[in-house]
Image: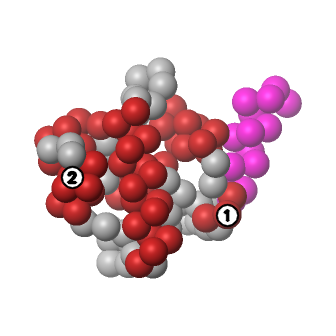
Amino acid sequence: MTEPDQVKKQIEEKLDCDGFLADEAFWSTDVAEYFARAQNIGEHKLSSDHWKVIHFVRDYYREYKRSPAIVKVARHTSLSLEEICNLFPCGLVKGAYRLAGLPKPPGCA
């Protein structure tokens, strides 16, 4: 098994049935990059704006034990809603929250 296949297997073993990390402690920047490649986010590499959003949602979740609304993400990152949507075309939940290693928010389809 090649190294990328081993990494993929290790990560996939840590996912819940919706494809989110089951254990936030397993998160790393490498995991975020893996998710980004799998979802075609950031073309070849995550930008500083991607990381700004990812780190904000992780910090917010640690403090409040829930994921922030997109308006709060925009306000705290100084990015417009349109910019955030362009950074994470699959949506904030399947994009930023997943890349940040957060659980799927309750009630989210």
**Residue 81 against residue 41 in the figure, above or below:** below
Q: Residue 21, how many percent across, how many down?
A: 59, 61
Q: Residue 27, how many percent across, how many down?
A: 63, 54
> In the rendered image, which residue does mark 1 sit on?
25
- Crowding around mark 2 (Cα neighbors within 10 Å: few <14, some 14 to 19, many 20+) is some
Give the Cα separation between the discs numbered 1 and 2.
Answer: 26 Å
92 sits to left or right of 102: left
Chosen colour scheme: secondary structure
Which numbered dot is residue 108?
none
Which amino acid, by three-letter code, is at mark 1? Ala
Tell me the residue at 56%/65% (across/down): 17
Q: Residue 4, how many percent across, how many down?
A: 73, 30
Which quadrant is home to the C terminus?
bottom left
Q: Secondary structure at mark 1?
A: helix
Q: Magenta segment, which residues?
A: 1-14
Which amino acid, by three-letter code, is at mark 2? Ala
Sequence-wise, which precedes: disc 1 or disc 2?
A: 1
Which quadrant is home to the N terminus?
top right
80 sits to left or right of 26: left
Q: Is residue 15 magenta?
A: no
Q: Is residue 18 in view from this perspective?
A: no
Q: Quick one: 103 or 68, which is closer to the camera?
A: 68
